[in-house]
Image (cartoon, grey):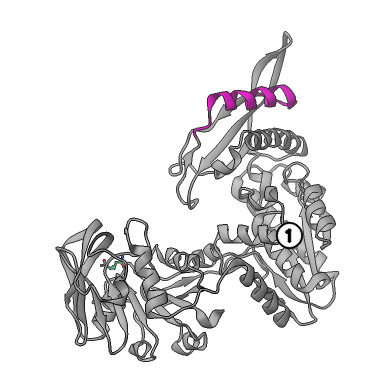
Amino acid sequence: MKENSIIILDFGSQYNQLIARRVREMGVYAEVVPYFEPLDRILARKPKGIILSGGPASVYLEGAPTISKELYQQGIPVLGICYGMQITTHLMGGEVARADKQEFGKAELIIDDVNSPLFQNVPNNSKVWMSHNDHVTKMAPGFVQIGHTDSCVAATYNKDINTYCIQFHAEVTHSEYGTQILRNFVFNVAGCEQNWSMGNYIEETIKNIRETVGDKKVLLGLSGGVDSSVAATLIHKAIGDQLTCIFVDTGLLRKDEAKKVMEVYGENFHMNIKCVDAEERFLSKLAGVSDPEAKRKIIGKEFIEVFDEEAAKLTDVEFLAQGTIYPDVIESMSVKGPSMTIKSHHNVGGLPEDMKFKLLEPLRELFKDEVRKVGRELGIPDHMVDRHPFPGPGLGIRILGEVSKEKADILREADDIFIEELRKANLYNKVSQAFVVLLPVKSVGVMGDERTYEYTAVLRSANTIDFMTATWSHLPFDFLERVSNRILNEVKGINRLTYDISSKPPATIEWE
Ligand code: GLN
């Protein structure tokens, strides 16, 4: 499968994840690697084609990211997109310069070589999406122009090295025939076969896990979240009881969380799960602390300690498994010009410096929705696979200010009602993240002629594509009314409910 793949060299474009997705959607395996990946390691993967992504730098400036010219001499077809086009032109002896006006948005592509394999089934005139400051002012020797717009050379080809370049972003949906152009590269030029699917991804991954792990043991921190659960299920399918999961009940989890996790993964999947009841331990450490950062640190540190203590009780564990997914990998690795910052991603909330385990991360090439697909295919029930993200510190940061068991219990009830109603109204999957926040504010109310003095809670629901920016969900008023009635009537301890109408930025999705 991997010998039938496309490798994408990442020059830092915000769209390179999209390129990988598009290719995988075609049934061909695609992998993104940083532009500085050594050539021998690229070749070892035996890719059928290489795509050079866009990127923020300018090729003519000192220190701009670059690659070895040898890459083009391997008999492997190359497609350069935007920066990829410019770096190819620059390396091969052409010229790239800053354009008089930058081009951002739609442009019309006019095809010059209608017989080019890259443009099969693409009309002679079509809309493409541009985003650049620089452009090719002189093509490199050996290259011919195969497409243009009214302001730039939009596509070039060099038959000696079977290299295509395009100035526009074929991977974004605004490029009308972008997917067709990528398909043409993948199938007509690179000659890939369609043999990648979730099913064979799972099969192959299971095989790899068995080979890597052998007869050793694996430890995994199961949180009940989508990523760790899918990773656990996949690894369990591969090596069964050689996997031990540790589930830490911090006392800051949602209602019946431990029970649900034990039911689904323990009873149904027969996984070996050690459920550690650490509620008292966490709550006593948090007593009297109200600063959000201090709370996060205490929870993170305590988590590692509990996890370590449990791990120490097991023998022969050689691997630590994590549900790291592709966006985590990318976030931890920024490819920005010559200086790259690589910080490692810590899925279990921070691994000890002197970690003695080897890491096992079977999902690190997948996007969130692909992880969900794997989960479904492995038989994990929908209500576990489609869950909204839940923060590591849990309710610890949704109870503003000081945390106590009383407050956690109140919040759990209220949150459970909100989520249950969202599911009943078929709204749960239409919002990206929804939860209740408990404020350290009491106000006066009246119930059955009696004065009450209770907590104020907040309903928070956000819609977002990437969690970097978000808007508040426009939930219907009658729905909000139903939730409000239920929470105020059923949850003792809350007598006032508000709805958060802040977007991110300037607010954040979580309150602390
Ligand atoms: N930074 C280059 C330019 O401005 C390439 C841009 C891109 O790859 N999107 O032209």
Report the quarter where the C terminus lies. Answer: top right
User: Which is nearer the eye, 243 or 292?
Assistant: 243
Report the quarter where the N terminus lies. Answer: bottom right
**What residue would you read off at disc 1?**
222
> Where residue 361 sits in the image (x, y, percent)?
64, 71
Q: Amino acid at mark 1?
A: Leu
Q: Is residue 484 magenta?
A: yes
Is residue 124 depicted above or below 494 in this figure?
Answer: below
Residue numbers of the magenta segment:
474-495
Q: Residue at x 72, y 8 (%)?
A: 449
64 sits to left or right of 452? left
Element carrying mark 1 = loop
- Crowdedness near tag 1: few (<14), some (14–19) or many (≥20) residues, C-alpha within 10 Å: many
504 sits to left or right of 130? right
> Where residue 108 sits in the image (x, y, percent)?
21, 59
Q: Residue at x 28, y 90 (%)?
A: 160
Q: Residue at x 52, y 41 (%)?
A: 462
